[in-house]
Amino acid sequence: MAIEKPQWKELFSEVVTSGLCTGCAACVVACPHDVLDYETANGVYKPWHLDIDGGRDNCTHGETGCTLCTRACPRFRNWESEIDTHKFARERTDDEVYGIGDVLLAKSTDESILDNGQDGGVVSTLLIYALENDIIDAALVSGLEGDGTTWRAEPRVATTRQDVLDTAKSRYTYSANLLAYPKAVEGGAERIALVGMGCMASAPGVMQSRKAGKIARRLGFTIGLLCSKTFDDAIFEELFEAKYNIKRADIKKMNIKGVFQIWTNDGEFHEVPLKEAHAFTREGCTHCPDFAAEHADISTGGIGAFGDWTLVIVRTDKGRELMNALKEKGLIETRPGDDDPGAVALLHKLAQLSRKRWPVEANPGPRRIPVTSN
Ligand SMILES: Cc1cc2nc3c(=O)[nH]c(=O)nc-3n(C[C@H](O)[C@H](O)[C@H](O)COP(=O)(O)OP(=O)(O)OC[C@H]3O[C@@H](n4cnc5c(N)ncnc54)[C@H](O)[C@@H]3O)c2cc1C
Ligand code: SF4
Ligand code: SF4
């Protein structure tokens, strides 16, 4: 019989230790008793429960009725159809393998944002517009620690155009941006946008559908990043440096377009085959079924024939309003997704591939859509 008030005890056994946990940190920031912490050392990105309060696998607050961690977890039980139904008022059809939404291509018309962004600078343009037009108070994004030369990603709060520009582009190691939530709230933010890969982008939706309180209300807008994996930090020394003599501190920009593309400060360009990088896949990604950040308001990616454009999936009315506003104000240029049928086909294929990773023995939600063998 299903437990009526599932708490950390159930989260620990059904998600954290079963391999489904992505390390998104939603449970950590939702916990009102501060008994959950987050491990980032040695490539481990997992929540853990303070021993003083119920031990590793149980929670005394859970025993007396607290369920906030399970209400915040976007991998707990029937998360996918719960969020679909809450966000889109229906479940997806079998054809909607990358989730519900319309595909288009977009890029910033501001050259400084475009040059500074990973692809078309659409995420930066959205955030800057929303901050400067009183739509949000803050955004949870990812920056690099220190002067950036270590390439260690860290969660950050952006409240200004400069913060957004300083934290643009992609890092391919994990950054649990939700961990910046307490800092945003301390700074007085009530309307907070979240930027994150699918694992994080499903958190606001699940919090809202399971009524997880203030945090669910504050995280009112989500920008997703398409993603098939992130890598352990060890990839820098053990692959890039050991085999290709590329040191962290010398890296200027990275991208993944079929291969790992690495630009270095000396003006050189390097390519590292993705198959060599797979050994460094972060554990939390191995069972992740969500390539397309299916529960974001707007999802963004870099696949396609047009290098300096962002592929955008507009999923909700909120997302549509914001994209329309950017277009009307001339802040972005757009073209239909049909201009790049190869990108849409690849999106479909990569979304299918990710869905196959959800374990058959787990809740059947994400495998409900038939997955083909190729
Ligand atoms: C780990 C990762 C894997 C990705 N994999 C794919 C892929 O397989 N296929 C694909 O098409 N697109 C992928 N993307 C998305 C792509 O790289 C771009 O982020 C997207 O196209 C938006 O580009 P932009 O120029 O509009 O964004 P920008 O304006 O450059 O803004 C990027 C935003 O992403 C945030 N960010 C950067 N790194 C991280 C991180 N590690 N964790 C959380 N937030 C971060 C930044 O803080 C910034 O807010 C991936 C992104 C990441 C971070
Ligand atoms: S998936 Fe996220 S919310 Fe769920 S247990 Fe792991 S870190 Fe917590
Ligand atoms: S594959 Fe991407 S979206 Fe999925 S768990 Fe890993 S980082 Fe998150």
Image: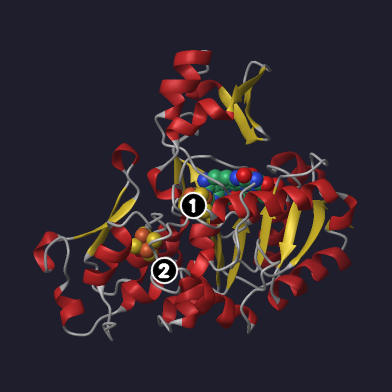
> Does dot 1 land on a helix, a strand or a loop?
loop
Whether pointer 2 and pointer 1 mark residues with C-beta atoms closer than 8 Å, the reply is no
Q: Please name the residue shown 52% across and 65% down the image.
A: 366
> Does dot 2 land on a helix, a strand or a loop?
loop
Which colour scheme appears in the figure?
secondary structure
In the image, residue 7 above or below residue 170: below
Q: Quadrant of residue 292?
A: bottom right
Q: Please name the residue shown 76% across and 47% down the image.
A: 120
Q: In the visual, does 171 lie left or right of 269?
A: left
The answer for how far apart the CA atoms under marks 2 and 1 are is 13 Å
Q: Is residue 305 visible?
A: yes
Label 1: few (<14), some (14–19) or many (≥20) C-alpha neighbours in 10 Å: some
Label 2: few (<14), some (14–19) or many (≥20) C-alpha neighbours in 10 Å: some
Q: Please name the residue shown 71% across and 45% down the image.
A: 302
Disc 1 residue type (three-letter): Arg
**Of residues 321 and 205, the one drawn nearer to the viewer in this rendering:** 205
| Disc ID at residue 33 | none
Q: In which quarter of the image is residue 259?
A: top right
Q: Is residue 164 visible?
A: no
Disc 2 residue type (three-letter): Asn
Q: In the visual, does 103 lie left or right of 297?
A: right
Q: Please name the residue shown 38% across and 54% down the image.
A: 23
Which residue carries the number 2 mark?
Answer: 363
In the image, residue 242 above or below residue 208: above
Q: How many labels does the image show?
A: 2
Which residue carries the number 1 mark?
Answer: 357
Residue 100 on image: x %, y %: 68, 70
Residue 238 on image: x %, y %: 41, 22
